[in-house]
Image (cartoon, helix red, strand yellow):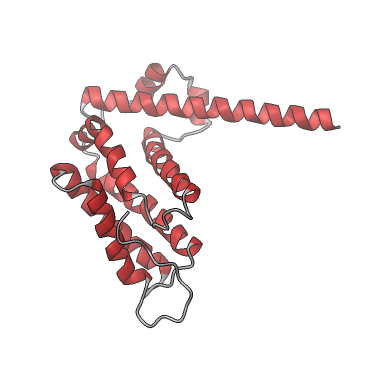
């Protein structure tokens, strides 16, 4: 019986690893095609499959469309930063790793520029707000913060302000990423630490 369970665990790990490789290959293929063609609408699923060297059956076992592949790239990016926050909870009780994410965007500048040229700016910002709001809401709950409005609304408002600030920073970069981080958490304090609150709450740092 133990041997059978061990075999199942190994098989599951192999399947998970293969699935991740497939998803990664498809994501990279789509990014390359967007950079090369300057368009998202003109890219077909067939082109993505050929570039990634992935079969149609494998594609449709994970995604319904090329839009799903696109959104999975955003999800993967934010998932990594969400995990990063969880690993450093005690060191920096922040709502979002702003400076790290900005540095990531700066390193991916050619990709971001290509996405914008391909007409994906609005979709990208909308998706980013959604993922950022999810992370912020989870952090509000994890840190037991009290808020002046409902946590979900507070998270959405802060996420929208954050992404708008990031968009501006990307075009200017006249302010250090750490300063944007500090400014965001200063703003967050205004909704996450209301005056005269009797709830036990963690104080967010002004500086990252």
Q: Which residue is more in the foreground, 144 or 68?
A: 144
147 to 102, vertically: above or below: below
Residue shown at the point (22%, 30%) measured from the top left: 110
Residue shown at the point (46%, 19%) measured from the top left: 54
Residue shown at the point (28%, 40%) measured from the top left: 103
Number of residue marks:
0
Locate the N terminus by quadrant: top right
Residue at the far right in the pictured view: 1
| Residue 111 in the image, given as x and y percentages of width and height | 26, 31
Locate the C terminus by quadrant: bottom left
| Residue 185 in the image, given as x and y percentages of width and height | 31, 60
| Residue 168 in the image, given as x and y percentages of width and height | 17, 49
Quarter-of-image position of residue 67? top left
| Residue 206 in the image, given as x and y percentages of width and height | 30, 61
Residue shown at the point (39%, 57%) measured from the top left: 94
| Residue 6 placement, left or right of 150 | right
Quarter-of-image position of residue 33? top left
139 to 196, vertically: above or below: above
160 to 53, vertically: above or below: below
């Amino acid at each position: 019986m133990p041997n059978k369970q061990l075999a199942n665990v190994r098989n599951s790990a192999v399947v998970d690893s293969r699935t991740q490789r497939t998803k990664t290959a498809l994501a990279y293929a789509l990014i390359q095609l967007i950079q090369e063609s300057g368009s998202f609408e003109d890219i077909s699923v067939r082109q993505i499959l050929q570039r990634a060297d992935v079969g149609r059956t494998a594609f449709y076992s994970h995604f319904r469309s090329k839009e799903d592949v696109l959104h999975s790239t955003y999800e993967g990016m934010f998932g990594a930063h969400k995990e990063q926050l969880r690993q450093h909870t005690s060191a920096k009780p922040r709502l979002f790793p702003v400076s790290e994410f900005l540095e990531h965007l700066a390193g991916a500048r050619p990709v971001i520029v290509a996405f914008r040229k391909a007409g994906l700016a609005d979709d990208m910002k909308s998706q980013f707000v959604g993922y950022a709001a999810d992370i912020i809401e989870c952090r509000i709950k994890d840190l037991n913060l009290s808020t002046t409005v409902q946590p979900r609304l507070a998270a959405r408002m802060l996420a929208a302000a954050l992404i708008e600030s990031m968009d501006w920073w990307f075009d200017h970069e006249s302010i250090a990423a750490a300063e944007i981080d500090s400014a965001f958490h200063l703003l967050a304090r205004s909704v996450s630490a209301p005056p005269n609150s009797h709830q036990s709450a963690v104080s967010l740092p002004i500086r990252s």
